[in-house]
Each structure stands twice: as structure tokens, then as C-alpha cells.
Amino acid sequence: MRRGLIARSPDELPDGVLDARLERVHAAMNAASLDALILYTNNTRPAGVSWLTAFVPYWSEALLLVPRQGAPVLVVALTYRVKTWIERTSRVADVIHTPRIGLEAGRRVAAVKADAAVGVVELDMLSAGIAGDLAEGGPRLAITDASDVFAQVRAQPDAAEIALAKKAASIAHLALSRICRDGDDLGSMLGAAEAAARRQGAEEIYLAAAPDLDHDLRLRRIEGAVARGPSFAVRASVAYKGSWVRLTRTLHPDDAAARRAIDAFAGAVAQLPDARALAAFPSWLIEGCRLTQPLDAVMGSRATPPAAPLPRLVSVQARIDIDGTPVLIGAPVLLGVLGQPARLLAPPVFD
Amino acid sequence: MLSAERRRRLAAAMAEAGIDEMLLYGNAWQGDYLRYAADFGILEGHGIALVAADGSIELFLDSAVEAERAEAEAPGVKIVLARDIARAVGARLDRIANHRIAAAPRRFVPKWLADPERSFSLEDGTALVDTLLMHKLPAEIDAIRRAARIADDAYGVFRAAVKVGRPQYELVADVEAYLRSRGCPDNFMILGSGGKDVLGMTPPSDRRIAAGDLVTTELTPCVEGYYVQICRTVVVGPASEAQRRACALYREALEAGIAAVKPGAIAADVARAENDVFRKYGLGDYVTSKWTRVRGHGLGLFCDSKPHILEDVDTPLVPGMALIVHPNTYHPEVGYLVLGDSVVVTDNGCEVLCETPRELFEVER
């Protein structure tokens, strides 16, 4: 559940930006002959609704109802007592509170047009309870999947989204820079990283660590007292006002090996979306927001085939072996347009 | 090992109910059913665990980083990474379509899997798993007790963090940093600060703590996946007479609620005991859904488990259930105020888990 700063900043996310995004969605809906578009949100899948309204649920769930014309309405399972909080932290025409969000959404759409064409983003993954309620609320609605319609609009970041991703990247970078090379207790190191991120206004931070790269390269959540090995890695997944990035740092006694790995990583990501250089590494992963999940695997050594369209804002993770020494690296990247090279939003360099 | 005990218990319950395969859905909001069997605390994406009659488990995940984490954190579970998790699970279930398959929580299962056009059908196994989640093993209660020690300490960190001029989110930063340093991987907390303008608790904002504020929070740290909760209120500066009176009322309500927790009682008895205290003082309006959500709830692998403590919930209380009793609500003279303690139902009453005094704590202006 979210417990970091959730606050709308008109400077960072002006009304005009949200209006422009909505206009693009309306255009796509018109092209697809949709009368209404419905997006689901909870704290796992907030990215579609937060992109359109800035609303991020700290728990519970909601549906965003986008009519073909006009502003969206949020139907939430959160209680009426948090209505003012929702209104403070997001931009929607109205907030409707009900435990059966599908039923209410179906009724509202059907009240305007009983046989409306309704597109639902990620329809197949909508929970059975909500899907059933939606059909009950609007028995004559023609409900189809609108994931492709939304993905085409969502893939192109605007300047505000890029700026938020940069801020998230700077928070993640600061957090990982607080990991002390000389410390022994991994918990204390993670505590320092967590404090740094949240004091910078992170909406969320997930920390994972591979405590001893000589024995296990897998990054995991740390519970209890865990000692580190001579070489270890920490990954910070950070959200800032709805924008998520991942950054991974390896602390290795051999600085030269780590530096060579960073150079190899930077060289490979510069060639993206051509992933052949990344594919030469033992493992790699590219994640970005396509629909509702903030960081969805779109390409990688385990994620095949590639998802389309490829988002321009991505986080890249890789394992790079330098003379038999494994190094884990990750950083957010903005893919170039018109032949421009991709560029790192935060360098994976901490010293 | 706790996870192995849970799996054996689930397999036995499935056998008794004649269920061949159990599908457990989870995400970061509602992850307790999944965690019960797979022992994986999901953070990103969707997860579906398939539990066979022999207790073996396949865990399907659609996030690549979560799949790697599950491979490290959930030994003995077969991990399957699939971008289209519903169809991957569906392909697996097609092979056993003639078996009795149940799903929990049934209403959370992806629509595609629940569609009547599938070759298999999913019965509702929610009540079966709910019983296991509510009626805990001794080792589960031990984990909750350990979480309670951390909650007491973390509340001390929270009190120390409350200082005039600090934004709300920095208080959370201090608590979360402390919890990570203690090796506590997860926590849920919301808070509020201010006076009569505050109607409840939410995630932190950038509002700065001011003199005279009531600062409320509920902390919900977890150990081995088991959450415990503590609710307390701090006042910045000396408490007013009205604030003291209000806190005394909430303490009386909390103590009445805790006294009602015993085998043979139902959840409604606890809520009624708390609410009767408010009604006695003419504040009956403030125990309605307009002002408060629940008067407590279950604790375990989810921070807001069944049963909800409300006057219309007839779930029987039995030994081994963990609850928080919290008469949190708005008070017309002072604003939103919270006070709550976690308890475990015992053979003849209940055991209170947290040791933090039930006070309205005062911190310096």
C-alpha cells in the first residue's frame, strides 16, 4: 500500500497537460467509435488513471469513466470520508463512492446510452466481480477490450511525464548513493536509502538486494538481519507523482570492473531501441508503462516476444560479466526519436 | 517451517472439501490468499498460484522482476513468468478441466479465467481460505507477536518525528527508515494532522505540523508477512481539556471493545461495545459510516482482513483469531482521533499484543 507523499503539483503537472492527454484519448475513442472508455486502478495498476487524472489510490480500487466528450468521472470503492483527499490530489469532474464500482459505472454509461460501445483497458484482466457488475449495471452495453486503443496514445511521453521521470530518477539515484560501501548491516543501508527517497517526496520506494553476488545474483526483499558479502547489489524502484523508474547499483571491491560494466551498459542502452548490444549480456530487461502497470516488461532475455508499441520512457536492467565478475546495473532511459540516441535519465555512477 | 504448515493445512482443507486444485489470486493490494500458499509477498503485477491436491504449487507472475524475486524468496514453488498470465493459467487448467477447481478470492479472479466459455469452471473457494486465514496456527500468532514488538518501537520513532514545521511525509520517512533498518520489509500507514478540519487519515501530504495539531496514525508493520497494527494520537503542545476528555472517551471505548473479545462472541459484539460508549456520551452519530469505516478488523497476511468489526457482522470469534480493536472516528470538539490495539483471541478472552500506553501523547511545540 502506498504511504509516501501523494500530492498534486500544478507546477509539475499542469491542468493543460492533463487536458492535452484527455484530448488525445478522446481522439482515439472517436477513431475507434467508442462512446466510453473505462480504466481500472488500484495501487498495483495505477498508471493509466494517474496519467489522465493524477489520482493514485493508496489502497482499494476505482474505475475511471471517460465519456467520448467531457471530463472523466472517478467511481471509487474508497469511502466518502476521503472524497476531499481525492479531490485535492487529482483532477476529475466528479467522484462517486460505492462499494460496487462496476455496477455504478455500468449504470452511469447505460443511463446516457443503453447500448453504448464501451472500451475497457485490459478487459480480460478486469476482476470477475467488477466485470459481472459492469454487465449487470448496463446489460445492453457492447463491451470490448480497448487496450490497443489506449496503448497507442500512452506510449508517447509528454514533457511533463519526462520531467517527473527525471525527478523519480534523481530520487532513486540519491537513495542508492546513501548505500555505504563500508557498512556491514544491510538493513541499516536500506534504511538510509529509504529515508533519503521519502524525504525527497517519493510516492513509493521498493528496495531489493542481492546481498552476496558471489553466491546468488537474484535481487530480493530483505527481511531480518542479513549480512552483505564483498560484492552486493541494491535495486531501488521509485515512484514520484505517478512516474516509476528503477535504478540498480552494484558495490564491488574492484572499482575498475564496476566502471567497465557501467561503460558497457551505457554503450548498449545508447543503441536502443536496437537491443542487440543488450542481448549480448547474460540477462537484461526493459520495462515501461504501456497500460496500467507502471513498469511492464516490454523486452528482455526472459520477456519474449517484445510488446508493442515500445514506450519511450523505459527502465533498463542488465547483468554484465567483466572477467567473470558479475555486475548488476539498471537505470531509466529515454529512447530517442528521429535517429537520436537513447539517453540515461540518471547515470548508474555513484562515486 | 510456517509456510509448509500452511500448505499442509490448505491441502487438508481442500481434500475435506473434495477440491482437486485451488487457484489463488493476488496483487499488492489483496495478496493474502496468494501468500498463504505461495509464501510470496507480491508487490507488482498480478500473481496466481495453483495449488494441487498434493500441496505442490505453481506461481504464475506477469512481472519479470517479481518472477526473479519469487525464485529467490519462495523456495519449493515452481515459478512461471507469463506476460498474459490469465491465458497461461488457462492453458494449465485446460489439462485438468474435468477436475474440481476452486478459486479464492473468487471475485478478484481475472474475467477471462472466470468466463463460462472456458473448458474448466471455477468454484468459489473464498470461504474455505477465509477460514484458514482467520483461524491461525500458533506459529502465525508468534509472527504477529513479533510484529507487535516492532510496532511499539516504531510508534516511538513516530512520536519522536513529530515536530513543528516538518511535513507529514517526513514522519513517514523516519518510520519507514527505522523499519527497514530493523529488517521489517513492509508496513502500511496513514496519518492525519490538524484540528477539527481533519475528517480521517490518508497518505501523507506536504502539510507541515503546527502547534496544537492532533497528529494521528495507524502503523501496520509485518513480520514474515503477518501484519499487526497500532493506532495512537499525539498532540503538539499541551493537550486541551477537550482533547483530554475526548481521549478518555476513546480509551473507554477501546477497553470496552477489548473486554468483548472472547470465544463465543461475534464481531458485532465488539463493535457494539465500542459504539455504546460513544452513544452513552451523546456521540452516537459519530459511529455511523458517515464518520468512520470500521471499528476494527482482522489482522494476518493482509493489514485489513476479515472480519470487519461492525455491528452487522456476525462472524464468530474463536481462539487463534487476531484483530485490531480501534474506535477511531471524528470527534466534534477536537477532530479525528485514533486509539487502537491489536489482540489475539484466547481460550478465555484475549491477549493484548501492543504495550504502548493508551495515552494522548504530548510532544513539545
Image: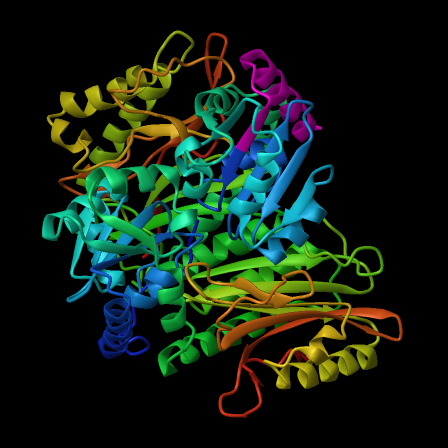
Q: Quadrant of the C terminus of chain A?
A: bottom right
Q: Quadrant of residue A274?
A: bottom right
- Residue B12 lies in the magenta stretch: yes
Disc tally is 0
Q: Which residues are magenta?
A: B1-23
Q: Residue at x 29, y 79 (%)?
A: A11
Is A70 or B36 nearer to us in this picture? Answer: A70
Measured along the vertical axis of the image, is residue A166 above or below residue B339? below
Q: Position of residue A99 (x, y in %)?
A: 25, 38
Measured along the vertical axis of the image, is residue A209 above or below residue B50? below
Q: Position of residue A265 (x, y in %)?
A: 70, 79
Residue placed farthest to the bottom in the image?
A339
Q: Position of residue B269 (x, y in %)?
A: 29, 15
Secondary structure mostly taken by the magenta-highlighted segment of the chain: helix
Drawn side of residue B10 relative to residue A66, left or right: right
Is B155 or A198 nearer to us in this picture? Answer: A198
Color encoding of the figure: rainbow
Q: Position of residue B125 (x, y in %)?
A: 47, 24
Measured along the vertical axis of the image, is residue A237 above or below residue A133? below
- Residue A81 lies in the magenta stretch: no
Q: Quadrant of residue B255?
A: top left
